[in-house]
Image: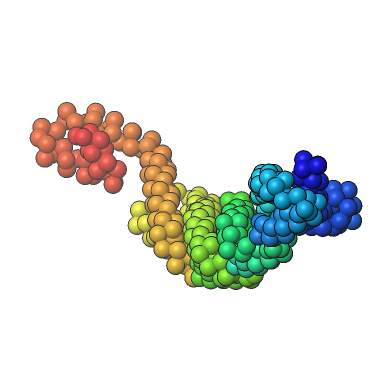
Amino acid sequence: MQKSAVEDCYKFYQAHLNGLFESASGGGGGSGGNRGQANSAEHNAQTKSFVDAVSERRLSAWSAVSKEKALSLLGHLLQGLPEPLERSRPELTDLIERYYTAAADLNRQKIHLRLFNVQKALELKVIDELALVRLPVLSAQLVEKADNLTEVTIGEFTTAIGDLVEPANLTSYTDGLRRSVRLNLDSTLLRNGQALEVFFENVTSTLLNSEAFNEVPGLKNVAAENSAFPPPPRKAFEASLEASIGRSVAAFTRRVDRFAEERALFEGKLAKLKVALQERAEALRAANRQAVSAYLAGEAATVLADFDRRTATTARQHFPLDTEELRTLLEAEARAARTVFSEDYAPKYGDYGEVYEAAVSELDRGLELIGARRQEENFRAFKAEVETPLQLAKRSILLSGDKYATLFSFKRFVSTFPLMGFVVLFFTFH
């Protein structure tokens, strides 16, 4: 009877203690818990998988009540049997304490498992929330969202845990949640930085490759090195370059305005754009100088061709000419050519400095070469005209040389010839 009473009281304790877990899971044991999960949202299902755990404080208090009732029941069962009752009390107490120790240990494991699963479920939720953000956005917005997520997540964690754990014992878990949000924020900030980099680079690339300097006069001709069209004057070209740089900077600022709060990135990219625009402008200046040089060279060639035509032998102008007459003609035509070139191109291209001066120098050199060629042509014409009389005079003089005893008498003889005599003497003695 003693043994049977102890067993019955022990079973009573077990049933009463297990009733606590059943009530915690909504009644009906494990099957009731599963029905509760089936009717909840996915997140709630994850965070409530171990609701049969109870707080250690509540379990301890419930166990004390159960133990007291079991011992009371034992007293009723063994009423009037003082000795069996005395022997049964320690036995029942030992059984109860061992069962409680095992139940408390299992409950602690369930608590820790529940805490872990709730924490992980909330961390996954944070990852999903941050993954849904369409990048790029302002970094400050991400930080603000992460702060809100931290508050919401810790609130959901505390609600999900309820009184399962004393608030003071949740610090390690809430700190873990904060670290998790921070790590995910850092990762998202990194991806956002990359997205911002791509965004700024795309805006910069579009401006540099498709829009900047398109309105600069003569740009297409400059880019194609096409000298068939007059390049723009320097002042107009420079003004257009500076205006284009200003428009490009304004367009950049306008297009990235929503990210202007990213001061370091914004200012760095703006500075990079300005450097690239200046480099492009300098390249265009160099190309334009080449275009101006090529254009002026072509125009100088036209002026030289006209000078060449005007100083050549024509129906109205035959070589040989008198040396002074030819020199006067060449100087007048060269002066006219320089005047035409200067009047036509100095106002537009004089401020190109060395480029214009080089064209003028080439023009002068061409005029000198053509002038020298005309003088050579005039000399050959003169020579061809007097060659036969000179040869005849030379032979006559040489044949008569033996008739004169002295050089003086010979020179007097030669002086009787016209101007040709001098030339013959020159050929004879040189």
Residue 107 image position (x, y, % from top left) = 69, 49
In the picture, the quarter occupied by the C terminus is top left
Residue 33 image position (x, y, % from top left) = 85, 52
When the figure is inspected, residue 259 is found, relative to residue 220, above or below; the finding is below
Residue 319 image position (x, y, % from top left) = 45, 48
Residue 254 image position (x, y, % from top left) = 64, 71
Q: Nearer the viewer, residue 190 or 352?
A: 190
- Please indicate whether residue 359 sits to the left or right of residue 12 in the image: left
Task: Tell me, yes or no, if residue 422 can be seen here.
Answer: yes
Task: Tell me, yes or no, if residue 344 can be seen here.
Answer: no
Residue that appears at 26% across and 38% down: 424
Q: Nearer the viewer, residue 5 or 10?
A: 5
Give the image quarter of residue 429.
top left
Give the image quarter of residue 232.
bottom right
The image's colour scheme reads rainbow
Give the image quarter of residue 406.
top left
When the figure is inspected, residue 74 is found, relative to residue 353, above or below; the finding is above
Q: Nearer the viewer, residue 165 or 191?
A: 165
Residue that appears at 14% across and 33% down: 404
Residue that appears at 44% across and 58% down: 355
- Please indicate whether residue 278 sits to the left or right of residue 122 in the image: left
Residue that appears at 72% across and 45% down: 84
Q: Number of labelled discs?
A: 0
- Please indicate whether residue 120 sits to the left or right of residue 74 in the image: left
In the picture, the quarter occupied by the N terminus is top right
